[in-house]
Each structure stands twice: as C-alpha cells, then as structure tokens.
Image (cartoon, helix red, strand yellow):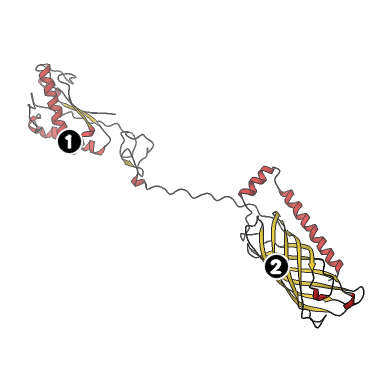
C-alpha cells in the first residue's frame, strides 16, 4: 500500500470519529441532569447484550526496531483497523499499518530506507465493565511486505501485547497498546532468521451505527399472595371475608361484614318462685311445657357458637309479687341458672357478663294478670354491640 493511500484512510477514519462524537452530542437530551440520570441508571438495549457494532480504529505510535536490522533504532508508525466485538470481552480486528526506517549506510548504502507494510488480524480480550478502564491482552498474525535495497517480498509475522481502553462516548473510545512484533524476514539479511520489534501505539475507536434506546425497567414481581385461608379478621378467614378492613371485635356475619346479632329468649319463662335457693337443674324451674323453653335456649347456644366474637350480659327478672328484696335474689338465681346452662353447653365464661338480677324492675308486661306476670318471670341475653 502506498503511503499516501494509507494517510487518506487514516484521515477518513479520524473524520468518522469526529462525526460519531458529534452525533452523540446532538442526540443527547437538552437537560444535562436528565442525561446524567439516564446514563447512570440505564444502559442501551443491545440485541446481543453488548455493543457488537463494527468500528474503525486509526492509530499512530512509536516503533522500536531490533538492532539486528541495522537501521535507525526508532521511528513513527501508523495504521488503521476495522473490527467488532464478538462477545462482551472479545474483539476481532483486521488491520493494516506501515513503518519506514532509515537504513544504515554501511549495510544498505547511502540514503536508503527499509519499509514494511503489514496486513493482519488481531484479537483482544478485555477485562472489566464496558464503561470503566479496561485492560486487555492482544494477539495477532499478519503478512509483512518488506522493501529495502537488498530485498523486497512477503514474510509471516506475529505480535502479542497488552493495552488499556476507555470509553469517551457511547460510540467512541481510545486505547493505548504496547506490543512485541516478530517478523520472519530471512531474505534481507540471510544471516538473520528474523527481527523482533516493539511498538507503543495510540488508537481512536469509532463505532458505526446508532445506539439503541435503553431497555424499559423491569417491574419487580408482585409479592406472593398470603394464604388467605390462614388469615382471619373478626373470626372470618380472608378468602371469604368481604369486609376485611373492619376493626377487630366487630360483630360480623359469615361474610365478614357487620351484622346486628339479636338473641331472643322470649318464651323462656319460669314457674312462680322458681328456682329455689340451691336449685341447679333448669328444666324443673321452667314454665310448662319446658321443652319449648329448652329449645329456645339451645338456639341461643347455637347463635353464640356461630358468632364467637359476641359477648352478652345474662340478666334475670321477676314479676311484681313479693318484696323487692326477695325478688332481687330470685332474679339473680334465674340469671345464674341460665348462665350455668350456657357454660355447660360450650360457651366460654369470658363471653358472658353477670349473672345480674334486676328484681321486679323493667317488666315487659302488666303484673295485673297471670299471663302478664308469667312473661315478666324471664331471663334475657343482652348483646353487647
């Protein structure tokens, strides 16, 4: 390759780097704060998970010649590479570069040069994150065309080195590289099998093509739903509870919603002057037929079991016959015998207030007739709403 042609390619590549950088700046949002926020929290959504765009990489550097060449010890070299990343850490690059040395006049004659044009492929393995400083290892092979007064022709060559790379923008980066290159040229000076040279190079890498938009943030998975069958509010599991926000202790129905509970003991009436002191069996104390009164009490037990949050006050009453003092004790015995009936049928005593006697107070019927007095001889379960 002619020197002017390589100069033109490098100039073209440098122009491409500038265009890519300008494109990055133009595409940036107007707000710098938005830009910094976006770049720090999101990354482009590359289809393969990494930037696999083609890139061009013009480079220049210093070349340090093997003393066996019998040339000037060092000079500049320049070249250009074209490549792409095949994974997040590995790139493959085709390259061409040129160097030209002043030859020693004792060996090559006065005013002569020794040039090499190299055409090859190099692979680089990078360490670290894409946006950080990334050290790397490099290896490559090439064909080297040498031209000097003693010979011209092709020879195989290989190189190995290390370097470090850093992104400048989403589409541009620079890298610095030091490498050893061996050229198996055994024709220019037949007594030599080849030459080992060193170089230190600087490259600007420009990726070609648009940067994809950042991937939309992935919403976190919803939390696992708790087992509603094992969670309860007001005694109703949350699977069936239609009113789960009610405060604990609210009286609710089977669906968990508020329900007014009424426990009616109308029909549970006592014989006159019963129970006596010390009497504990409720059946003989009830007005006949006692089975009707017991059926009503059993319904009350069932209601209390279905609504375990319900608390009641057990209160007893009498008719108007007799003294107030005597009727007070009689009302307390009536409340106590119903209280004991409930607890003996599975109702916890913590849910029952009393027993309380109200004596001849608060009649629900007249005490002037036998029927009215019979209804006043009663016990009530007063629900605490």
Residue that carries the numbered disc 2 in the rendered image: 161
Task: Decide which of 107, 96 is in the foreground and name it.
Answer: 107
Quarter of the image for residue 282 reads: top left
- Direction right: furthest residue: 110
Q: Whole-percent x and y of residue 209? A: 71, 58
Q: Whole-percent x and y of residue 27? A: 72, 49
Q: Is residue 40 left or right of residue 352?
A: right
Q: Is residue 207 visible?
A: no
Residue that carries the numbered disc 1 in the rendered image: 343
Which of the marked residues, 1 or 2, is nearer the chain's N terminus? 2
- Direction bottom: furthest residue: 190
Q: Is residue 348 left or right of residue 285?
A: right
Q: Residues within 10 Å of mark 1 (few under 14, many from 20)?
A: some
- Point 78% across, 55% down: residue: 18
Task: Decide which of 146, 291 is in the foreground and name it.
Answer: 146
Q: Residues within 10 Å of mark 2 (few under 14, many from 20)?
A: some
Q: Is residue 348 left or right of residue 237?
A: left
- Point 23% across, 38% down: residue: 305
Does 271 appear above or below 30? above
- Point 32% across, 41% down: residue: 236
Q: Whole-percent x and y of residue 333? A: 12, 26
SS for dot 1: helix
Tell me the quarter of the image containing the N terminus: bottom right
Q: How many marks?
A: 2
Q: Is residue 148 left or right of residue 279?
A: right
Task: Decide which of 351, 88 is in the foreground and name it.
Answer: 88
Does 147 appear above or below 79? below
Q: Whole-percent x and y of residue 19? A: 78, 55
Quarter of the image for residue 328 reads: top left
């Amino acid at each position: 390759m002619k020197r002017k042609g390589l100069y033109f390619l490098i100039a073209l590549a440098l122009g491409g780097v500038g265009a890519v950088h300008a494109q990055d700046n133009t595409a940036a949002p107007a707000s710098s704060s938005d830009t910094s926020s976006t770049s720090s929290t999101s990354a482009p959504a590359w289809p393969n998970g990494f930037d696999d765009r083609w890139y061009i990489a013009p480079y220049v550097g210093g070349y340090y010649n093997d003393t066996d060449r019998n040339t000037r010890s060092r000079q500049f070299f320049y070249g250009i590479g074209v490549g792409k990343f095949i994974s997040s850490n590995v790139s493959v690059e085709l390259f061409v570069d040129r160097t030209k040395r002043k030859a020693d006049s004792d060996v090559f004659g006065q005013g002569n040069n020794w040039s090499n044009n190299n055409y090859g492929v190099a692979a680089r393995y990078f360490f670290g994150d894409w946006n950080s400083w990334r050290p790397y290892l490099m290896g490559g092979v090439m064909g080297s065309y040498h031209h000097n007064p003693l010979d011209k022709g092709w020879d195989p060559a290989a190189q190995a080195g290390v370097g470090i790379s850093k992104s400048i923008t989403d589409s541009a980066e620079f890298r610095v590289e030091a490498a050893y290159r061996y050229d198996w040229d055994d024709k220019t000076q037949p007594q030599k099998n080849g030459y080992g040279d060193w170089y230190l190079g600087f490259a600007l890498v420009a990726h070609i093509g648009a940067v994809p938009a950042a991937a939309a943030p992935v919403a976190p998975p919803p939390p696992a739903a708790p087992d509603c069958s094992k969670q309860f509010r007001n005694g109703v599991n949350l699977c069936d509870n239609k009113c789960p926000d009610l405060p604990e202790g609210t009286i609710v129905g089977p669906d968990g919603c508020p329900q007014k509970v009424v426990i009616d003991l109308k029909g549970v009436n006592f014989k006159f002057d019963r129970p006596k002191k010390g009497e504990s069996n409720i059946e003989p104390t009830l007005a006949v037929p006692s089975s009707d009164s017991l059926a009503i009490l059993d319904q009350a037990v069932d209601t209390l079991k279905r609504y375990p949050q319900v608390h009641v006050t057990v209160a007893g009453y009498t008719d108007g016959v007799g003294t107030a003092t005597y009727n007070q004790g009689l009302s307390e015995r009536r409340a106590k015998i119903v209280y004991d009936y409930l607890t003996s049928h599975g109702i916890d005593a913590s849910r029952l207030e009393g027993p309380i006697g109200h004596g001849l107070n608060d009649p629900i019927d007249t005490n002037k007739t036998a029927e009215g007095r019979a209804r006043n001889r009663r016990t009530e379960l007063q629900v605490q709403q």
